[in-house]
Image (tube, rainbow, N blue to C red):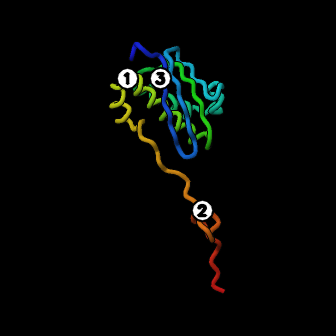
Amino acid sequence: MNSETTKFYGIGRRKESVAQALLTVGTGNVSINDTNAKEYLQNNESRFLRINQPFVTLNLTNTFDVKIKTKGGGLAGQTDAICLAISRALVECDSNNRLTLKQNGLLTRDARIKERKKYGLKKARKASQFSKR
């Protein structure tokens, strides 16, 4: 960890969601949009574990306080965006973390987004029922 700075910043995106994570050395408090993380994620344990995955991978649980600003999309997209943002901030903290996070797939941005609607169709691929007569 760099002794000059104690704040580390990372940004993550997924679908329509954008998350900005600010890590400071602390006790492990996580707040999302000025709300407790478990409350914001509707007490969904799997989403909370997904957010903490970078810390668990590096054995850094309860060493950083995380303040997250997120917007856009739904909770699933925001959760993955937050995970990517925290991973990028941890790489900024110590470049030796990069290899471990990359091997676990935590630094890869999931580029899948919603397909655009085409004209003549109801959605991207859904068409009205075909009628012979």
Q: Quadrant of the N terminus?
A: top left
Residue 105 location, x and y as percent? 39, 38
Residue 23 shows in this picture = yes
Label 1 neighbourhood size at 10 Å, few (<14), some (14-19), many (20+)?
few
Residue 5 location, x and y as percent? 44, 16
Label 3 neighbourhood size at 10 Å, few (<14), some (14-19), many (20+)?
many
Q: Which mark is residue 8?
A: 3
Whether residues under marks 3 and 2 lie with C-beta atoms below 8 angstroms apart, the answer is no
2 or 1: tag closer to the N-terminus: 1
Element marked by disc 2: loop
3 or 2: tag closer to the N-terminus: 3
Q: Which amino acid does label 2 sit on?
A: Lys
Q: Nearer the viewer, residue 59 or 18?
A: 18
Rendered position, 21 above or below 24: below
Residue at x 33%, y 25% (from the top left corner): 96
Q: Is residue 83 left or right of residue 34?
A: left
Closer to viewer: mark 3 or mark 2: 3
Residue at x 38%, y 32% (from the top left corner): 101
Element marked by disc 3: strand
Q: Which amino acid does label 3 sit on?
A: Phe
Q: In which quarter of the image is residue 133?
A: bottom right
CA distance for labels 1 and 3: 10 Å
Residue at x 36%, y 26% (from the top left corner): 97
CA distance for labels 3 and 2: 39 Å
Q: Which of 105 and 47 is in front in this view?
A: 105
Question: What residue is pinned by disc 2?
Answer: 117
Q: Residue 94 carries which label?
A: 1
Residue 76 location, x and y as percent? 57, 41
Q: Quadrant of residue 109?
A: top left
Q: In this view, does 34 lie to the left or right of 93?
A: right
